[in-house]
Amino acid sequence: EEAQLDGQINGVFQVKLRDKGPIGVIRLDAGQGELRVKHEEVWETFAWKTLQLNSDLGDRAISSKLQLTGVESGHLEVLANIDPRSEQKKLQGHFDINNVDLSALRPFVSQVEAIKGQLEGRGMLAGTLLKPLVTGFVQISEAQLSGGDLPVPFQQLQLRADIKGEHLQLNGGWKSGD
């Protein structure tokens, strides 16, 4: 047993399948909960106070909103609209990442013993469902990474990824060693 999920999911699933495509609503609410992941005999916990997915399926648009709010800090929101009429399933939307404590990612990064810092980001979604184009940024600030498989610790890590479609530009710096 390497992972445990503690929580409940409540939902509404009202979908009618038609020749033109599905129509209806999907609402999933996981309320408060936690995911526990075992790493080297130690259980790491990722806890949330809000985890919701809301989707409206219609003839002209499929609109979905995903929200995740951590127990101690951080919020992630993704809003995506898909045009079901277009052959390529055109996509538009945005994402917003606010004040996410990087230590919440610890259960998912087994190569690192300690992780601290803040994650922020914003951007737009475009393109198609199978070939999305993202424009925006993701930024790590005041981060520290150490232990595990890292040969040296990283302190005062600042890293910004500017994303423009298929291009990514990284800028940043850190202190390491003495």
Image (cartoon, rainbow, N blue to C red):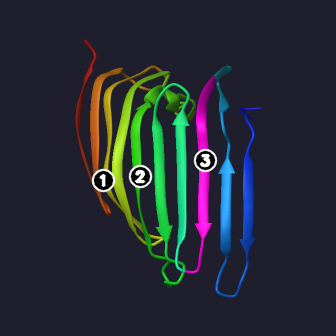
* Whether label 2 touches label 1, CB < 8 Å: yes
Choose mark 2 or mark 1, whichever is in front. Answer: 2
Query: In the image, is 172 to the left or to the right of 68?
Result: left
Q: In the picture shown, does residue 67 fall above or below 63?
A: above
Residue holding disc 2 = 95
Q: Please identify the quarter of the rendering in which residue 139 is found.
A: top left
Residue 143 among those drawn in magenta? no
| Residue on which the image places disc 1 | 136
Quadrant in the picture for the N terminus: top right
Reply above or below: 59 against 151.
below
Residue 35 locus on image (x, y percent): 66, 33
Earlier in the chain: of badge 3 and badge 1, it is 3
Which secondary structure class fits the magenta region best? Answer: strand
Q: What residue span does the magenta drawing correspond to? A: 44-59
Residue 146, how many percent across, how many down?
A: 41, 21
Given this view, does label 3 or label 2 mark the residue nearer the observer?
Answer: 3
Residue 52: mark in rendering: 3
Distance from the alpha carbon under mark 3 to that under mark 2: 15 Å
Mark 2 or mark 1, which has the lower sequence index?
Answer: 2
Closer to viewer: mark 3 or mark 1:
3
Disc 2 is placed on an element classified as strand
- Image quarter of residue 58: bottom right
The amino acid marked with disc number 2 is: Phe
Question: Circle 3 sits in a helix, a strand or a loop, which is it?
Answer: strand
The x and y percentages for residue 119 are: 38, 35
Q: Residue at x 36, y 21 (%)?
A: 152
Q: Is residue 19 above or below residue 55?
A: below
